[in-house]
Image (cartoon, rainbow, N blue to C red):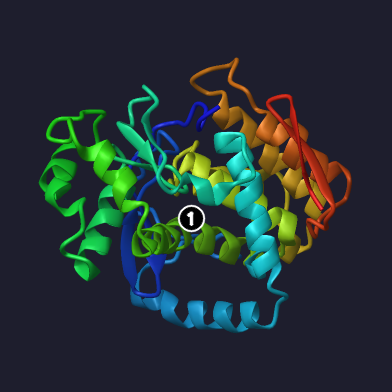
């Protein structure tokens, strides 16, 4: 099964110090307003230069915390779990050359994290890659990628783009570029915020999965919107709340967002995976680990 049922999402800014970056993925349906921004551990929106001092404090706090999901073995585990949800395999490194139109309104979905031609993140990936490798096999499609951004169109991409993607993915530089964009847009912001919220390794993964699936939007079905809704129902651990209580609420909202457009959508990535880890009290994602995804059992020793 290839990346089942991703939801379309729109562009949402994420604040890094004084700079806002427009980033998207194949995630939520949100159309956030101009006040969209990265929310801090206290639940406040960061904006512009006034957030620099707060970010420095956050950096100092994070530096004193355990690596959590950022530890090499845990990050590897995170990619494996995500790959079982997206591609029914533990072999996440085998997905760099993946490309397919899932008919979900996002155009082509491709690569190690499911970059999409319709949601800006694939375009951003190719633009960044082309700056360092201007002679790459995807550069000639940049005008077409800019034209189809925000739609499901293949105009200017067919024929040829899919084959060019597969060929380029055989190169180590392009695989590295995919990893870099995955971390910049999805992994690093999710893990950072989870740590500021007082969440352990499991909570950091839950945030990462939601960020990938719903995108960094601030509306009701974007990642930041889901977090704000969860915080309205339960305190985050860094504010004195119980980790399991908060994560139970967050997973409930995550699940509802998944089924917003399709009430029958498979939610085993939550029900028999993340919820199982949570109910088992495995907040550190300690191995050996066993979970079920779409009826198939996966194990990591």
Q: Give the residue displayed 12% in from the left and 35% down from the top.
A: 156
Q: Is residue 77 left or right of residue 276?
A: left
Q: Give the residue displayed 13% in from the left and 41% down from the top.
A: 144
Depicted 113 relative to depicted 26: above or below: below
Residue where numbered disc 1 is placed: 186
Q: Residues within 10 Å of mark 1 (few under 14, many from 20)?
A: many
Give the percent coordinates (x, y) of residue 271: 74, 31
Q: Is residue 265 visible?
A: yes
Give the percent coordinates (x, y) of residue 24: 36, 48
Q: Is residue 228 visible?
A: no
Depicted 118 relative to depicted 11: above or below: above
Q: Give the residue displayed 45% in from the left and 39% down from the top.
A: 27
Pick out the residue farthest to the right.
280
Give the percent coordinates (x, y) of residue 237: 75, 61
Q: Is residue 62 left or right of residue 239?
A: left
Number of numbered discs visible in the structure rendering:
1
Q: Give the residue displayed 22% in from the left and 66% down from the top.
A: 133
Q: Nearer the viewer, residue 8 or 290?
A: 290
Give the percent coordinates (x, y) of residue 145: 18, 43
Quarter where residue 127 is shown: bottom left
């Amino acid at each position: 099964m290839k990346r089942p049922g991703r939801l379309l999402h729109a562009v949402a800014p994420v604040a890094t110090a004084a700079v806002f970056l427009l980033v998207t993925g194949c995630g939520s349906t949100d159309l956030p307003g101009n006040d969209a921004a990265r929310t801090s551990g206290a639940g406040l929106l960061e904006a512009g230069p006034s957030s620099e001092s707060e970010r420095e404090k956050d950096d100092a706090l994070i530096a004193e915390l355990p690596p959590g999901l950022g530890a090499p073995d845990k990050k590897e585990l995170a990619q494996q779990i995500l790959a079982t949800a997206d591609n029914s395999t533990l072999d996440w490194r085998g997905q760099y050359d993946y490309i397919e139109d899932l008919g979900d309104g996002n155009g082509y979905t491709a690569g190690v994290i499911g970059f999409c031609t319709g949601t800006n993140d694939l375009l951003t990936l190719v633009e960044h890659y082309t700056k360092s490798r201007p002679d790459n096999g995807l550069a000639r499609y940049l005008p077409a990628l800019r034209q189809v951004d925000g739609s499901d169109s293949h105009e200017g991409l067919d024929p040829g783009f899919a084959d060019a993607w597969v060929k380029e993915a055989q190169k180590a530089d392009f695989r590295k570029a995919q990893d870099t964009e995955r971390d910049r847009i999805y992994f690093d912001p999710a893990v950072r915020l989870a740590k500021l919220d007082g969440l352990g390794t499991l909570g950091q993964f839950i945030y990462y999965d939601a960020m990938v699936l719903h995108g960094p939007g601030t509306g009701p079905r974007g990642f930041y919107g889901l977090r704000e809704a969860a915080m309205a129902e339960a305190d985050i651990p860094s504010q004195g709340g119980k980790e399991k209580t908060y994560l139970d609420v967050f997973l409930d909202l995550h699940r509802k967002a998944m089924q917003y457009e399709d009430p029958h959508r498979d939610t085993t990535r939550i029900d028999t995976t993340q919820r199982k880890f949570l109910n088992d009290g495995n907040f550190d994602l300690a191995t050996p680990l066993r979970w079920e995804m779409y009826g198939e059992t996966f194990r990591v020793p």
